[in-house]
Image: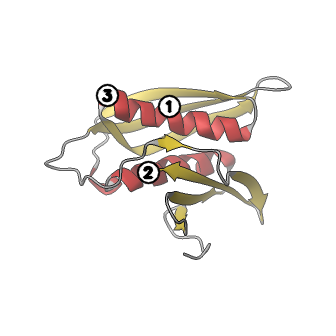
Amino acid sequence: MSETPSDHGFVFLDHKADVYVMAFGKSLNECFEYAAKAMFEVMTDTSKIEPLIRREVHAYGFDLFSLLYSWLEELLYLFDAEGLVFSSFNVQRISKVDEENYVLDAVVFGEKFDPTRHERRTVVKAITYSQMKIYNEDGRFIAKFVLDI
């Protein structure tokens, strides 16, 4: 696949075995929102998810890579542990709290996965640091990462 941006805030890039994602946004917050949306789009059609359940999510990292990892891992945990799928992500804050630590605060909306209404796509087993990059290019924040499937 090309690295041409879509209207969705993410594209899937070529990868031999797993799912390689490029998410982007006007801000780092928006970029992280689209990273989460891309992960759930791998699992199901997010356009069919109703925003019936609201969850506050907090993630912590010692750099932006570990923060992205922690954010996606927390959402994947909610899917694995509670069967929740999400379609709306509002990253309210990403900030550096001291010399070495970042925090992310977000509100996400979704519902319980219902196989009669939600398409069952590919299972995401884990988030990885493989090929992870986070950078700003031409006023746009970009995050690239691999999902283990």
For the residues labelled 3 and 2, say whether their Cβ atoms are less than 8 Å apart. Answer: no
- Which residue is at a point 17% across and 50% down the rendered structure image? 117
Closest to the camera, between mark 3 and mark 2, is 2
Determine whether label 1 and label 2 are within 8 Å by CB.
no
Residue 75 x %, y %: 46, 35
Camera-side residue of 146 and 137: 146
For the residue labelled by badge 3, is the local secondary structure a helix, a strand or a loop? Answer: helix
- Residue 97 occupies quadrant: top right
Camera-near label (1 vs 2) is 2
Residue where numbered disc 1 is placed? 74
Cα distance in 3D space between marks 3 and 2: 19 Å
| Element assignment for label 1 | helix
Q: Where is residue 6 in the image (x, y as percent from the top left)?
A: 53, 70
Who comes first in sequence, dot 3 or dot 2?
Answer: 3
Where is residue 146? Give x, y as percent.
57, 53
Task: Name the element at disc 2.
Answer: loop
Dot 3 alpha-carbon crowd within 10 angstroms: few under 14, some 14 to 19, many 20 or more: few
**Residue 149: mark in rendering:** 2
* Residue type at numbered disc 2: Ile
In the picture shown, does residue 120 fall above or below 137? Answer: above
Q: Relative to the observer, which residue lies in front, 36 or 148?
A: 148
- First in sequence, mark 1 or 2: give its number: 1
Q: Which mark is residue 82?
A: 3
> Which of disc 3 and disc 1 is earlier in sequence?
1
Q: Distance between the residues labelled 1 and 2?
A: 17 Å
Q: Which residue is drawn at 26% across and 52% down?
A: 120
